[in-house]
Amino acid sequence: MYTQFNEQFAAATREFADAAAQVNRLAIESTESIFALQLAAIQDRANATFAFLGEAAEVRDADGMKNIWPKGVQVARENLERGVAVTQKVMEHSSKANEQIADISKSQLASAAKTAQSSAEQVANAVNEKTQSFAKNASKASKAK
């Protein structure tokens, strides 16, 4: 009996460990991708900003400031647009990773439920057999009296 219990426990533990490893792998891959997206976006925004600041540093009079002002607004707008676009990509990527993790969890729960149902059916069958055996023995004993 202990051997059967140990084997079931070991099998369940292995299944859980495999599922946990898959979830960890997905989470790490997702984190790496998100980090790469954000790092690329930061680099692009920093390059655009520093290019603008380089131009702004060369301005020496009010006319130059009037001419560079629209460029500054344009850089700010592009930086904001890039930030929003990257945020949308990050959310989309996170959503996909979460769906994959949910699928793994769902399959793990389905497997556990199937195993539990199978075990419960085995126990119910064993109890039913013992009950029928006990009833037959009790019936024989009462007839013998």
Image (tube, rainbow, N blue to C red):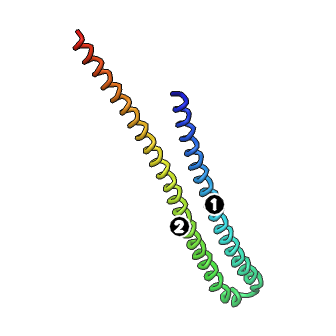
Picture quadrant of residue 16: top right
Q: Position of residue 51 (x, y in %)?
A: 73, 80
Task: Give amino acid for label 2.
Answer: Glu
The correct choice, above or below, for 113 with respect to 23 in the image is above
Left or right of residue 90: residue 106: left
Q: Secondary structure at mark 2?
A: helix
Instruction: Please tell me which residue is depicted at 53% across the width and 28% down the height of the picture.
Output: 2
Q: Position of residue 85 (x, y in %)?
A: 57, 73
Q: How many marks?
A: 2
Left or right of residue 44: residue 5: left
Residue, disc 1: 29
- Name the N-terminal-most of marks 2 and 1: 1
Binning the other alpha carbons within 10 Å of mark 2 as few (below 14), some (14 to 19) or many (20 upward) gives: few
The correct choice, above or below, for 66 with respect to 134 in the image is below
Task: Give amino acid for label 1.
Answer: Glu
Instruction: Please tell me which residue is depicted at 64% across the width and 80% down the height of the picture.
Output: 75
Instruction: Please tell me which residue is depicted at 55% across the width and 30% down the height of the picture.
Output: 3
The correct choice, above or below, for 127 with respect to 20 in the image is above
**Mark number displayed over residue 109:** none
Q: Position of residue 92 (x, y in %)?
A: 53, 67
Residue, disc 2: 92
